[in-house]
Image (cartoon, helix red, strand yellow):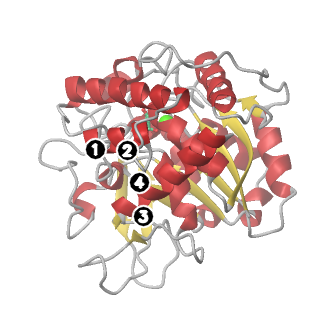
Amino acid sequence: KIDVWLDCDPGHDDVFAIIFAAYHPTLNLLGISTVHGNASLSHTTYNAGSVLTAIGQPSIPIYPGASSGLVRPAAHAVDIHGQTGLDGTTLLPVPFTGPKSEPAIDAIASALLQTPPGTAWLVATGALTNIAQVFAKYPALAGHIKGLSIMGGSVGSSFTPAVLGTVTEKDRIGNWSRWAEFNILIDPEAADQIFSNPVLAAKTVLIPLDVTHLVLATKDVQEQLRNGKEGTGNTTTLRTMLVELLVFFAKTYADVFGITDGPPLHDPLAVAVILDGVSGHEIPFYDFKGEVNGTRTKERFEVRVVTEGTHEDAQNGSQTGRTIVRLLPKGEEGVKIPRGLNIPRFWSVLEDCVKRADEV
Ligand code: BDR
Ligand code: CA
């Protein structure tokens, strides 16, 4: 099994990242750390505990991390995720166990440093504050882990040819502002530290909006989630809860962004990418130039983050929080950014994880 640590800010889509990491048969979820983001740290921590209880995994430890950015105040995505971070259902249980008291960054480092060198993954689906802090305090961790997977940022026209998503340079490439994606924008200094660490950058996979907007939780996806692949019509409390969360998420995405086909299910993609190349379990992620089944190229990117300006500047059109992405010459080390993935396979594997969670 592949050891994984998940740093998250649940959040509707983070819920599915938790399910994926906790229930994929080749992943071993060591622990969860929480961070400010979609809601306050106390909400995201409570939500993580509630989700683990709902899926029958209350013994996976949860460590609360940073409640604001490295140098910035916290900012929450109330319009998208509601006040609690997980609005839209009354079926979330009270967490069976409380969070741990050890500081998150110490817990992350100690868990990952106990894994065999070059094997474990760290996945980040929220602000990158905890992640920047853990590598600042434990620099050897960068050399130790196999990879760091981040849901964040957006690429836009640096992807040539463009990815066929709903993210276009013409109008906007970001979501929280014209230029910036939420997870990067709320702590751009943290993101900048990570991408400018060459050891870490060479191990980082970035899943930007360009890719996540290919994976919309449509009505069909919601129906499959309600009934399972067999479509028996006998839904369960867990499935009802997950569908209610997606219905809320779909409504806010339609209201705020005008995306009416379904909300992008960003965060589980950052977990799924770990499986790329894992024999028998691949969810093919493509960094192709051309067709999905064409030759795979090994694209590597330099990622820089715009740190000038405030959150409010970003709302007014400045590039604060933007990820500026440059394709590196062949052979140079850098961040991997897939240009797409096998979408039906992703939904199928996610459904298998939900099914396993449901059987507990
Ligand atoms: C990211 O921001 C959060 O609102 C989501 O959970 C996801 O991690 C998308 O920009
Ligand atoms: Ca998130």
- Inspect this view and state whether residue 224 appears: yes
Q: Which label belongs to residue 337?
A: 3
Residue 139, placed above or below residue 238: below
- Inspect this view and state whether residue 307 appears: no
Helix, strand or loop status at disc 1:
helix
Image-based side of 73 in relation to 230, left or right: right
Q: Which label belongs to residue 224?
A: 2
Residue visible at 35% across and 50% down?
212
Would you say the residues marked 2 and 1 are in contact, meaning their CB atoms lie under 8 Å apart?
A: yes
Rate crowding at label 2 as few (under 14), some (14 to 19) or many (20 or more) other CA atoms within 10 Å. Answer: some
Mark 1 or mark 3, earlier in chain: 1
Rate crowding at label 3 as few (under 14), some (14 to 19) or many (20 or more) other CA atoms within 10 Å. Answer: many
Q: Which label belongs to residue 347?
A: 4
Would you say the residues marked 3 and 2 are in contact, meaning their CB atoms lie under 8 Å apart?
A: no
Image-based side of 4 in relation to 330, left or right: right
Camera-side residue: 97 or 4? 97
Q: Amino acid at mark 1?
A: Asp
Would you say the residues marked 2 and 4 are in contact, meaning their CB atoms lie under 8 Å apart?
A: yes
Would you say the residues marked 1 and 3 are in contact, meaning their CB atoms lie under 8 Å apart?
A: no
**Front of the two marks 3 and 4:** 4
Compute the Cα span from label 1 to label 3. Answer: 28 Å
Image-based side of 204 in relation to 299, left or right: right
Q: Amino acid at mark 3?
A: Ile
Indicate the position of residue 41 as horizontal and vertical percent values: 61, 21
